[in-house]
Amino acid sequence: MYVTIATYNNPVEAHISRGLMESEGIPARLESEHHVWANWQMSQALGGVRVLVPAPMVNQAREVLSRRDNGEFEAVLFEQDIAAAPKCGVCGGESFTHARSWMAIFTGLAVWLSTGTVFPIPKERRCKTCGAIEVMKE
């Protein structure tokens, strides 16, 4: 049996809370999400989007929400080191531009003209300091 632990007028906020529950090992699901997406004006009448967890885990889920509301998870984000900027393998520079081959530009232009889609995502980057071209990792 599942129990409602929180309600939201915005389905995105409900998904964030559901994801938080799942990241803490608590299975969670949403109810009325699709009704609210289809007709958001009815959100209040439907009681919003409900986040539900199994009955035995209600106290644990409320503790997670309490920790979130107290800013504990946000504080951890600020304590973590932000990933270092990519560096050029040749000179160590940190400033890049995207490099595209002429074939990629021609193909992108042909596709764009025939279908109206956009250019492909570049697979290489060029160091602004030394001009070295590196293949980007996905």
Image (cartoon, rainbow, N blue to C red):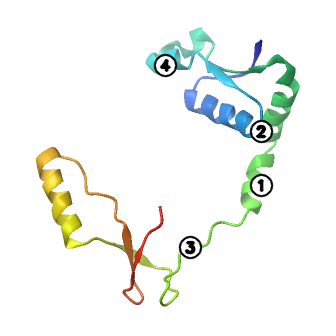
Distance from the alpha carbon under mark 3 to that under mark 2? 29 Å
Q: Residue 76 shows which numbered tag?
A: 1
Q: Are marks 3 and 1 in contact (CB under 8 Å)?
A: no
Nearer to us in this view, 117 or 103: 103
Q: Nearer the viewer, mark 3 or mark 2?
A: 2
Disc 3: which residue: 85
Point out the tag, 4 or 2, that comes first from the N-terminus: 2
Which residue carries the number 4 mark?
Answer: 40
Q: CA distance from mark 2 to mark 1?
A: 15 Å
Q: Residue furthest top?
A: 45
Q: Secondary structure at mark 4?
A: helix
Q: Secondary structure at mark 1?
A: helix
Residue under the image location 53 percent in, 80 percent down: 87
Q: CA distance from mark 3 to mark 1?
A: 21 Å
| Circle nearer the viewer, 3 or 1 | 3
Q: Which residue is mark 2?
A: 24
